[in-house]
């Protein structure tokens, strides 16, 4: 092959390569014309069903524990003497919320805010008296199992009236709000509104 032919062949190859590169670049520009890269900030937040269920799965959530001691007595009038039964009862009343009592759509998103509707704070366990610690303080006369059960129920009512005060319920509610906010903050939510069901 002559040098002149060789030079012509190199020129043709270079020209064809240049034409192919131009065509590919032109095609890429046309293809990308309709596509664009942009950044869109979505302020809306939506808790996932898994997150909602994980909160519900907490079950009973205690926010205030009140240890109580009650001295309870009963007197039965007799002809010659009175019978008396005095006992000391100990118990721990736990105030909180039962997450299984949440209503449908209890947690929802509104823009960048999470709205949580919680069930009322109340007594989590009705069997709060520790019967193993119950002490007979004074006993005279004969008393039946029914009499002792009546005294137990009286102690239970007294403990509840002393523990389920407006102040204690409000304290438990405030503790609930603090802990719920902390948990939702840890999940990445910052704007949180907490409401209570009646």
Image (spheres, rainbow, N blue to C red):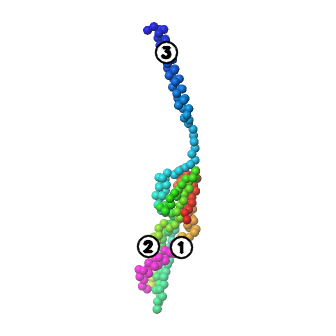
Which label lies toward us, 3 or 1? 3
Q: Nearer the viewer, residue 120 or 38?
A: 38
Does residue 63 lie above or below 133 as drawn?
Answer: above
Residue 183 visible in the displayed image: yes
Residue 84 among those drawn in magenta: no
Q: Secondary structure at mark 1?
A: helix
Residue occupying the point 48% across, 66% down: 124
Q: Secondary structure at mark 2?
A: helix
Which secondary structure class fits the magenta region best? helix
Dot 3 or dot 1: first in sequence order is 3
**CA–CA distance in space, label 1 to label 2:** 19 Å
How many numbered dots are placed on residues in this image? 3
Does residue 196 lie above or below 29 as drawn?
Answer: below
Dot 2 or dot 3: first in sequence order is 3
Residue 190, image x and y in percent?
A: 57, 52
Image mark for residue 12 = 3
The residue indicated by pointer 1 is 161
Which label lies toward us, 2 or 3? 3
The quarter holding residue 195 reads bottom right
Residue occupying the point 53% across, 61% down: 118
Residue 64 visible in the displayed image: no
The residue indicated by pointer 2 is 131
Residue occupying the point 58% across, 68% down: 167
Which stretch appears magenta? 141-160
**CA–CA distance in space, label 3 to label 1:** 102 Å
Q: Nearer the viewer, residue 117 or 28?
A: 28
């Amino acid at each position: 092959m002559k040098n002149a032919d060789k030079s012509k062949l190199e020129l043709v190859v270079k020209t064809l390569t240049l034409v192919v590169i131009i065509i590919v670049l032109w095609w890429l520009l046309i293809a990308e014309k309709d596509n664009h890269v942009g950044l869109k900030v979505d302020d809306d937040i939506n808790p996932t069903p898994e997150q909602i269920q994980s909160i519900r799965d907490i079950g009973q959530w205690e926010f205030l524990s009140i240890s109580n001691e009650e001295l309870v007595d009963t007197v039965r009038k007799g002809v010659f003497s009175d019978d008396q039964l005095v006992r000391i009862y100990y118990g721990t009343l736990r105030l909180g919320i039962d997450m299984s009592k949440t209503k449908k759509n209890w947690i929802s998103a509104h823009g960048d805010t999470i709205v949580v509707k919680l069930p009322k704070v109340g007594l989590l366990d009705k069997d709060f008296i520790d019967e193993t610690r119950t002490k007979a303080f004074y006993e005279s006369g004969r008393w039946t199992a029914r009499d002792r059960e009546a005294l137990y129920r009286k102690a239970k009512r007294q403990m509840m009236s002393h523990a389920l005060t407006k102040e204690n319920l409000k304290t438990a509610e405030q503790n609930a709000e603090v802990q719920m906010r902390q948990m939702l903050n840890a999940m990445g939510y910052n704007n949180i509104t907490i409401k209570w069901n009646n």
